[in-house]
Structures are given as C-alpha cells and as structure tokens.
Image (cartoon, coloured by chain):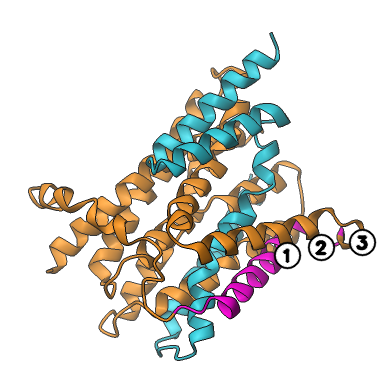
Chain colours: A orange, B cyan
Amino acid sequence: MNAKEDFCYGFTKGLPIALGYIPVSLTFGLMAVSGGIPAWTAVLISLTNLTSAGQFAGTNLILENAGLLEITLTTFIINIRYLLMSLSLSQRLGPEITLTQRLIFGFGITDETFSVASIEEKKLTSAYMFGLVSGPIMGWTLGTALGSVIGSVLPEAIGNAMGIALYAMFIAIIIPPAKRSKPVLNIVLISIGINLVLKYVPFLGFISSGFRVILATIAGAGIGASLWPVTDNSAGVAQNQSNMDGGDVSRCREY
Amino acid sequence: MPRILIAVFLMALVTYIPRVLPIAVFRREIKSVWLKSFLRYIPYAVLGVLTFPDILYSSGEFLPSLAGTVAALFLAYKEKSLLTVASGAILTAYIAGLILHI
C-alpha cells in the first residue's frame, strides 16, 4: 500500500474509536465545567492531554485545589502504562520512520489506538499511524467541547449515567480478543483478581490507585507471558477484525 | 487561573513523555519471547484493571452501574462498536437509575 492508502486505512480504523470517544469526552466536559473549570480550559485539557483516566484524575485534583506536584505525579503514574504500550509499538514500527514522525504521531497513542495498532498483522507505517490517531484526536476534543456546552442544561440523572462511558469503552476493547484467545481472557481475569486483592486487603491500603494499576498490570501480563508465551505474531488475538473494513478503505480514497 | 494552566501543561507533559520516549529512542528488536509476550499482553491487563471494580460505582450508585456493566459486557460480546457499547451502557444505567427511584 502507498502512503495515502495507508493513511486512509488508518483513518477508517480510527473512526470507530473517534465515535466511541464522544460519549466519554462529553462526560469529561460535563464533569469539568460542572466543577467550575471554564469550557475553553476543559477543551484545552482534552486537546493537550488526549487521555482518559489520567486527565479525569488530574482534573479532579485541580478541582480539589491539590498541589501541582500531586497533580503531576498522579497523572504521571496513571500514564506510566503508555511507556509499556509505546515500547510494545516500537517493535512494530519500521526503521524508515523518522524521529520527527514518531514525536508527532506518538502524541496520539491511547489505550484504544494502541490496541487497534497492535493487532494489525503487518509492520506499521507512519502514514497508517497518522491516519489512525487523527480521528480520535478530533473526536476527543469535539466531544469535550460538546459536553462543556450542554453540561449546564443536562439533567443530573443523565450526567450520572454517563460516568460509565469510559469503562464501557474499555470493555468494548477487551471482550472481542478475550473471546478468541483463552490466554487473553485468563490474563484479564488474573489482573483484575490482583487488582481486587491490592484494593481490598486492608494492610495493602497504603498503595495509591495509580501504583495499584501498575502493579496489577505488570503482575498479570508477567504471569501471562510466563504461562502462555506468544510464539507467533498474532497471538490468535484478533484475526477477524482486519477483514471488516475492506470496503471503507476504497471509500476513503475517493476524498 | 494561571495555576490551572500550569497544571494542565504539567499533565500534558507527563502524558506525552511516556508515550513518545520508547518509540523515539528504542529501535532494536526485542528477542526475548517472554518480553515480547509480556508487552503483547499489557493492554488487556491494564484495561481490565482500570475497568474492574471501578465500573461498578461509575454511575454514582451500585445497581444502575451493575446494570450498565452487564449491558456493556453483552454488547461487547456481540462485537458491537465502541460507540454502541458506550451508549448502550449509559442508556441502561440511566434507565436502571430511573426504575430504582420510582
């Protein structure tokens, strides 16, 4: 595929993520503005952070008047998982991709774009990565703007219900590969089990939620790697997904 | 106001750095099967951990959140899109909340 086709293919892969981001970022805009943050600042947060869990937590701390160090540290700890994702992606990027390109599309690595990129069968090109991240960046920002504006007119019950959007999105990402791969399912369950132990066993209560996420993730993925080492590239994780968007690529090319 | 902007800038910085540092500096291929498998499994582990148990309190109350969770699991099992799963969970949690407070 040439660069333009790669971009288009990536863009079509990113569109469902962009749409899925709307209810979640809308919730974020809603939460930020109802807490007293100006709409334009909420949009700025989404545009510059482009992350779910980290910016939700950071913004909550801003609203609680927490210190800059605590805000920065908490956000960082929640985002350490990106180190692992980025390291994983580094194995899939060709050597022809320049540093500048990496510095730009790297901004768009999220849980979702990473998951979609990492289940691609082929080496990833920079055009694909640019295509993949551009839709989600727009979706996340626009959703936040929308949430900031309608926040004041939305009934409280709807606002509460929307709190589930972020997690529902995570579920939408994990379940299909977990259906197809027993190791993936086991790893998800083991990680959650470890997370529950760390959270509810009383003498472990000193571990902050950010560190808990890191510990449970490393332990779960580590146990998985020991018990079910991946020998082929796909890990049987999501072979069916790449066939789904064949028609969309040609449509994208017309623009 | 400037304090908020400084906080936003710092948040953006500590979100950006972990994202780009590895892909910017790390170019070698990892040979270890264990490490490759470990990295492959990270996203599933982390998303599971971020979701459970927090989702069960995400809509304010337990029962509506539980209803929304079941809806999300069902729709995701049926391989519906991100948008459908998110909207379905919100709608279910909302309706469950209404029923609870009749």
- Labels 2 & 3 near each other (Cβ < 8 A): no
Location of residue A156 by image quarter? top right
Q: Residue at position x 56%, y 31% from top?
A: A162
Q: Residue at position x 60%, y 68% from top?
A: A80
Location of residue A5 by image quarter? bottom left
Q: Residue at position x 52%, y 53% from top?
A: A51
Q: CA distance from mark 1 to mark 2?
A: 6 Å
Query: For the stretch drawn in magenta, what is the main secondary structure?
Result: helix
Image position, residue A119 (x, y; %): 36, 65
Residue for badge 3: A203
Q: Is residue A200 left or right of residue B78?
A: right
Would residue A226 be counted in the magenta stretch? yes
Q: Chain of mark 2?
A: A
Q: Which residues are magenta?
A: A205-230
Residue for badge 2: A207
Neighbour tally class for label 2: few under 14, some 14-19, many 20 plus, Cα within 10 Å = few
Residue A211 is tagged as 1
| Amino acid type for the residue under numbered disc 2 | Ile
Q: Is residue B102 above or below residue A207?
A: above
Q: Is residue B87 above or below residue A44?
A: above
Identify the secondary structure beneath mark 1. helix
Neighbour tally class for label 1: few under 14, some 14-19, many 20 plus, Cα within 10 Å = some
Badge 2 and badge 3 both on one subunit: yes
Image position, residue A99 (x, y; %): 35, 80
Q: Chain of mark 3?
A: A
Q: CA distance from mark 1 to mark 3?
A: 15 Å
Question: Is any atom of residue B9 visible in this view?
Answer: no
Identify the secondary structure beneath mark 2. loop
| Amino acid type for the residue under numbered disc 1 | Phe
Image position, residue A148 (x, y; %): 51, 31
Would residue A81 be counted in the magenta stretch? no
